[in-house]
Image (tube, rainbow, N blue to C red):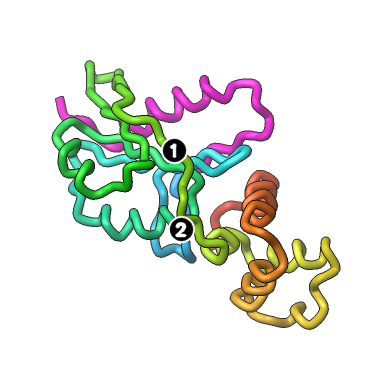
C-alpha cells in the first residue's frame, strides 16, 4: 500500500500530540507559510524552537523539494522530512545532513508506522530577516512599541519594520519574540 499525505499527516499529528501532551506552550500548525508565502512547511511545532515537518509520501514527487529546502533553511530551527521508502535515496542526495529523516510505511488502511532513519540537528543557517517575516505587520510594530523603538516606523511598510527589528535584536531574541507571537496569534488565515 502506498503512503499518502493525508495518512502520514494524521499519524504525525497523533505522535506530536502524544509527545507534547501536557505542554501548554506548544503550538502545532498545519501549512505554515514561510518567506511571505514562498513555501509552506506541512506541519510546524512551535515551542522553545520551530521544528518543521515536510511530508513526501510515495504519492508525491521530489520536484519542488530543492526550492523548499532553500526557504525552510532560512527560517526553521530544525527540520524533519517524513517520506515513503521510494524517496529515501533521492532525499538523501538533496537535503542537508542536519535534517532528520523518518520513513513512513503504511501498515493497513488505518495505520502508518514511522521509523526514524536520522535525527534532526539544529539549523546552522537561519536568516534573521526571514524569521521576522513570520510576523504580520501589526505584530512586528507591536514588538517595536514594546521596546520603545517605534518612533518613525508607525506608518512604514512592513519590510521597513522587519528591517528595524533585525537591526535591533539578536537572532536568538528575534526567534524568541517570533515564537511567542505565533503562540499568541488567534486568527491564522487572512483572506
Query: Of discs 2 and 1, which sits in the foreground?
Result: 1
What residue sits 48% from the left and 42% below the top?
Answer: 122
Tell me which corner region of the image, top left, top right, bottom left or bottom right, holds residue 128.
bottom right
Q: Is residue 41 visible?
A: yes
Describe residue 183's horizontal placement relative to residue 10 as left or right: right
Task: Indicate left or right for 107 with 54 as reference.
Answer: left
Please say whether residue 186 is visible from this viewpoint.
Answer: no
Residue at the image position 23 percent from the left and 22 percent from the top: 106
User: SS at mark 2?
Assistant: helix
Side (left or right) of 117 relative to 128: left
The label on residue 121 is 1
Residue furthest out toward the right: 148
Closer to the camera in the image, 103 or 31: 103
Mark 2 / mark 1, whichever is N-terminal: 2
Is 95 located above or below residue 117 in the figure?
A: below
Q: x and y percent of residue 191 in the render?
A: 52, 63
Q: Residue 126's x, y, as percent?
A: 50, 56
Give the x, y percent position of residue 181.
68, 51
Q: Is residue 69 magenta?
A: no
Verify CB contact (< 8 Å) between mark 2 and mark 1: no
Vertical placement of 136 versus 152: above or below?
above
Q: Quadrant of residue 59?
A: top left
Total marks shown come to 2
Q: Nearer the viewer, residue 103 or 126?
A: 126
Mark 2 — residue? 74
Residues drawn in magenta: 1-29
Residue 166 x/y as whole percent: 64, 67
Q: Separation of disc 2 and disc 1 at Cα?
A: 15 Å
**Which residue occupies 49% across, 27% down?**
16
Amino acid at each position: 500500500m502506498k503512503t499518502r499525505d493525508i495518512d502520514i499527516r494524521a499519524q504525525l499529528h497523533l505522535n506530536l500530540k502524544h509527545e507534547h501532551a501536557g505542554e501548554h506552550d506548544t503550538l502545532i500548525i498545519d501549512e505554515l507559510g514561510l518567506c511571505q508565502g514562498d513555501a509552506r512547511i506541512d506541519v510546524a511545532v512551535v515551542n522553545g524552537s520551530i521544528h518543521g515537518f515536510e511530508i513526501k509520501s510515495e504519492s508525491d514527487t521530489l520536484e519542488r523539494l530543492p526550492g523548499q529546502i532553500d526557504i525552510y533553511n532560512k527560517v526553521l530551527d530544525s527540520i524533519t522530512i517524513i517520506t515513503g521508502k521510494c524517496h529515501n535515496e533521492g532525499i538523501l542526495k538533496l537535503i542537508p545532513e542536519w535534517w532528520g529523516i523518518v520513513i513512513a510505511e503504511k501498515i493497513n488502511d488505518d495505520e502508518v508506522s514511522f521509523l526514524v532513519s536520522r535525527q534532526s540537528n539544529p539549523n546552522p543557517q537561519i536568516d534573521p530577516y526571514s524569521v521576522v517575516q513570520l510576523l504580520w505587520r501589526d505584530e512586528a510594530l507591536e514588538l517595536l512599541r514594546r521596546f520603545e523603538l517605534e518612533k518613525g516606523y508607525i506608518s512604514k511598510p512592513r519590510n521597513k519594520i522587519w528591517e528595524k527589528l533585525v537591526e535591533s535584536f539578536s537572532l536568538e531574541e528575534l526567534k524568541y519574540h517570533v515564537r511567542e507571537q505565533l503562540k499568541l496569534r488567534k486568527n491564522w488565515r487572512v483572506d
